[in-house]
Amino acid sequence: MSFEQNIGQQIILTKFFEYIRSENFEQCFHWAKTELQANNSPAFTLVNQLEDQATITTQSIENINNDEILLLFCACYGYARHEVEESNWYNHAETLVRSSITALKALPSCAFNKTLQQFAVIQIDICYIDRGIYTSQEWLMAQAAENIDAHLVCINELTAEFNDVECQLYSEHLVQEFSSYRHFSAGVSIIAQLCAIRWGDPEILTQQMAKLRPKFLEAVKALTDDDKYIMSTDLEALWPSLRFFSENRPKGSGELFVERGAINISYFACVNHTVTRELRQSLSNIVDQAPKTHKLYLEDWGAEAPQRNMLNDIWAGISKNFEDIYSWQLPELTMPFRNKNGKDSNLNFAVELIYYPMGIFALNLKAQLNNVSASGVRHAMSLGTPFAMDQKMRWHNQDMGLLEEFAENRFIELANSLNSNFDHYEKPVSDILSFNKTENRYVSTLLDRIVECVDGECAAVTAKSIKSHFAYPVFVLQQRELRSAVDDWCLRTVNSESFNLNQDCYNHEEFAYTNHHECVLGLLQQPNWVIEQSAEMMGVAAAINNLFQLTNKRLDKQLKFSLDQALPTLSDKKITASKLKSRVEKLQTEGECLKQFTNDAHWLLDLISAGSMMTFPDHTRMIQKVFKHMDFEKLHIRTQSTLDKIQNRQEEIISETAKLYEKIRTRNSKRFTRVLSGSMALISIGALKDIFDILNGSKLGVNISGPLQVSIVVLFAMMLIILLVNKNGNEK
């Protein structure tokens, strides 16, 4: 049944476009989902799992009626539009749009259905426009705008095939939508055209901006008049950065490219301190004995056998206690990266898992940044943030969209491997590995050689000249979630030079900035060994910082549990000596682990405070400033305080539990004595009766029987009872 014959479907479309016109995309999704649930439709299950499984196949909707398939289209499309506006999950949104098209293709074919499919597919090009904005790739924007224009031409041809009802539906719901897309595409095309020449002659850029400005404003106004608030403001925000380029970029300056550089993205997880000693010993045995198989070989990951690592010679203060550092080399993770003009360019991350002795795992992903534009470097930096744009990543025959998703999966699997290694415990160790993929991360960017390209000629820039270059902010600005325009970094304020850490270790013209989540090292005048040494310094500092941050969270949880834990008492009937003994032994073992960790933590914290970590004074000053910029002092104070509280509470619980154990053991011993005494008394009474029998059967002429025998036995029994009662009273 076609749209013209199905009033129900016409009502669904009317409601759907009400949400779309009002730009209320999330509500559109929930409305369609609720309708499917109310109908008890199998499509509801598909909609309910769209976040995890966005792909809908033709086979999965074969037995669903047409009205519900149309609602499925509405749900997928509404969810996709919501994601485009509220997140950077463009791959996921694109998949949702394709699923919405799959739903439409399952309906009877007609010109209006094909028009709806074209309406949906335009949203994929909107995703590419947003990608171009986010990653400063104007060619993506230009290409997507051309695609939108092509779709609009196709739609215009389809309208010739409409019947009267379809013409009415088109007029009511789609004419304004396609008009808005036409204006938006025109505005984006202008921006893409201007962005393509932003690094050329500033005067030419200024002239072209003056020429195209009226058409651009016309597109913005048309969108505003159509009540397309989101599209109009998105478009309008693309102009300021271009104006800044035209007004502030010096003539003769060119675009910057990193000829040699690297990026290292790290995620951290902390091991429960109750197993750190065993884990350290297990890893030492693996390396020293090289067994054929072992659960910690991580063979399912395609990992190489773990190796023992050594710190650089700059770490005099901690090198001896940090001897047992272990690492696993994992398969590469690859992703397409800035493939302009169809070139097959990938970002290839070498993946390494490192374990540091005090219980911190670092999952490091390192990629070379060679011949990458300054905007491309910023794109790469964003990959290690919670607001990263999803990509088509591949690792060890697995697909994923985000690096934090990759890290989360690895740490979950690692926790399972650790628990399987410690299978001698009665139960899996709770929270054996704690991590927060959003919070416990660090992005380190190394810049070795930067060139400036003017009119096709590239020349190396000096550390001094780069600070005065128009594009200097692209390297030193902190990462932000906001991406409102191509190269909008030019509109933001650079960190004060007072935050530059170069004074202690590097040349005064170089730069080194860090905070809790990222660092950039612009060491353009240093040999490779200095760059590697500096990168290791930042990496170890980040690992230590995250160790104590994660430790604080676990200690807070442990302290709350300890304070809430009621001490056992004699009145508790379920308490037994064996249970208490087992509990004391467990607490003592945990206490020893906690004490060892506390000693290690205090040692390391004191070492950092005293400035004794490093071999050389300049590195000492540098590392202290690094920790300051990472807000380590707050963690330092809090960790020491919480550790002391937990240890005191743990000792109190152990002491009280041990005392109770002794009381119960003594009580049980007395009970046994009383039972034994009673048993002996009964035996004695029985023996007395036997004596009477013997006397009566003898030839001595003595006969004690009847009431006399009973009286003697009763008297003797009463005397024993009085004796036992007095004895028990004295023992209490």
Image (spheres, helix red, strand yellow):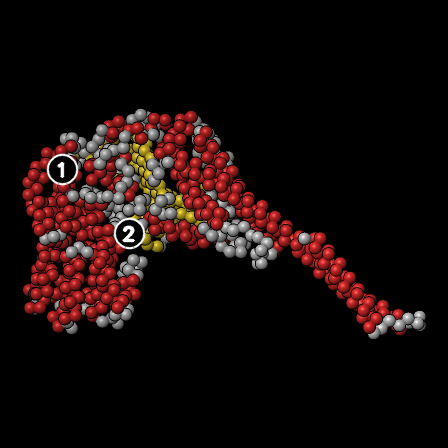
Q: Residue at x 31, y 30 (%)?
A: 500
Q: In the shown orientation, is residue 307 left or right of residue 244?
A: right
Q: Amino acid at mark 1?
A: Arg
Q: Residue at x 13, y 33 (%)?
A: 247
Q: Residue at x 15, y 56 (%)?
A: 22
Q: Amino acid at mark 2?
A: Lys
Q: Position of residue 618 (x, y in %)?
A: 40, 26
Q: Position of residue 391 (x, y in %)?
A: 28, 50
Q: Quadrant of residue 155?
A: bottom left
Residue at the extreme right: 700
User: Dot 1: within a 10 Å radius of its alpha carbon, few (fewer than 14), some, or many (20 or more) residues?
Assistant: some
Residue 686 is labelled as none
Residue at label 1? 243
Are the residues at dot 1 and dot 2 in contact (C-beta closer than 8 Å)? Answer: no
Between 487 and 688, the one lying in front of the other is 688
Between 623 and 379, the one lying in front of the other is 623
Q: In the shown orientation, is residue 496 left or right of residue 656?
A: left
Q: CA distance from mark 1 to mark 2?
A: 33 Å
Q: Is residue 147 above or below residue 526?
A: below
Q: Position of residue 239 (x, y in %)?
A: 14, 41
Q: Position of residue 277 (x, y in %)?
A: 52, 44
Query: Sequence order check: which comes first, mark 1 or mark 2?
Result: 1
Residue at label 2? 392
